Image: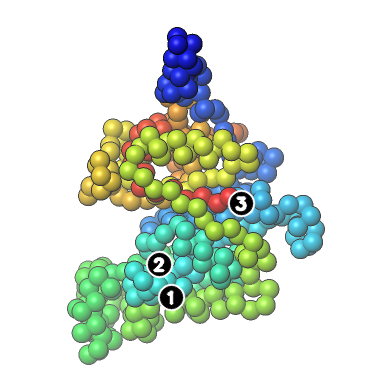
Amino acid sequence: MKITFFLFFLITSPLTFAGKESSCKRVILQREKWGDLQYKNMPVYDQGQLGICYSYAAIQLIDYWRKTKFFKKGVQLALGIKNMPLSSPFFGAYLQRKQAWGLFSRAGRRNIELGFIEDVINAVRKGGMCRIDIVNQGLNTMAKKYDIPPETLVSFTHQLLQEYNEQTNFFQRLSDKSPQKFVKKYLQRKFQCSGPPYQGICVRHFEVFSQFYPLFKKNNYISFLDEAFKDCYKPNGKYPWANNLPRPKRYKTISAKKFQKKLIELLTRPNPQPIAIGYCSKFLLRKNYIGKNRIGFTDSACKPHASIVIGMRERNQKCEFMIRNSWGNSCKDYVWDCEYTRGRARSEGHGIWVDGMALTKNILKITWLE
């Protein structure tokens, strides 16, 4: 009887001799043999002011999967490609919104902000990924047409349309009456320009905004980008691997412990992949922040964001995860430990180590590829 009870206790007890955090072994998904981590196959992205973090997370899942699962040496030789080219987060956001339906079927034509990680992956599976050189060439050509620096074209045009949409009725009434009156009122509101005639920087603004009047009138950012990316739809305009992408996996729960358990499980599998997380980014700036209540609802300070998890380790008997964010390589704003790229200045970080439970208390959903 005593032996039977002891065996039953061993089987049913939640305690293990290995300890709760023993499975949180050190895992780092970056591969130093790939070369410079800053610029090669796991670059540190900076999304700037454009709210497409969801696409940055999705594209990083896609590119890592290609490198480790598909883009083997034999495939490279067969395709005649020496190095694996990166994908474009901007094109991913555009493609996802171009194929949008349901919630984003109408608003999706106006801008590319706000979206879902899995929708970008499925859009690439269906529509393919444009070659990065063609994406850049299309944006450069568009920038030249409007006489705008290529590096500011995307954020500039997106900001104009976003502000237009926020005050649609006001601007459309003006633009219906007179394009010149619309531009004049816009310059007054945004840049405090008085005129015409305009002086100084207001002259440049007037010229640029006048050129963009047809774009305002269409109120359709996707049509504008269709012109920029028209060469993507020509033969050989896209990478040949998109049909091989698997469907994205998703996991959602209101339990922080279950989220942590799932992250550990995914990172300890053979040949693990990065994990995209939708979470409250406020906790990156405040350690004790919890943006999710017991039934899963978020508060107004949550600031939903998307990043990828690329590693884990155990510190002080607690599990920590490494987040690769898309806010550039500066760590000065984070309250967590920064992982710096070897051999580089300490101002150039490529990951943030965060407490596991602090993170999972703010996670809304996770997405990954197998």
Q: Which residue is mark 1?
A: 222
Q: Residues within 10 Å of mark 3 (few under 14, many from 20)?
A: many
For marks 3 and 1, give the one nearer the viewer. Answer: 3
Q: Residues within 10 Å of mark 2 (few under 14, many from 20)?
A: many
Local secondary structure at mark 3: helix
Specify whether residue 7 is in view.
Answer: yes
Q: Residues within 10 Å of mark 1 (few under 14, many from 20)?
A: some
- Single out the residue that lies furthest toward the top: 2
The image shows residue 219, relative to residue 317, as above or below, that is below
Q: Position of residue 135 (x, y in %)?
A: 57, 68
- Single out the residue that lies furthest toward the bottom: 177
Task: Tell me which label, 3 or 1, sits earlier in the chain.
Answer: 3
Local secondary structure at mark 1: helix
Instruction: Say if mark 2 contacts mark 1, CB within 8 Å.
Output: yes
**Residue type at the position of mark 1:** Ile
Instruction: Say if mark 2 contacts mark 3, CB within 8 Å.
Output: no
Q: Which residue is mark 2?
A: 112
Left or right: 17 with respect to 184?
A: right
Residue nearer the viewer, 125 or 47: 125
Q: CA distance from mark 2 to mark 1?
A: 8 Å
Q: Residue at x 28, y 46 (%)?
A: 296
Q: CA distance from mark 2 to mark 3?
A: 24 Å
Q: Which residue is mark 3?
A: 65
Q: CA distance from mark 3 to mark 1?
A: 28 Å
Specify whether residue 210 is in view.
Answer: no
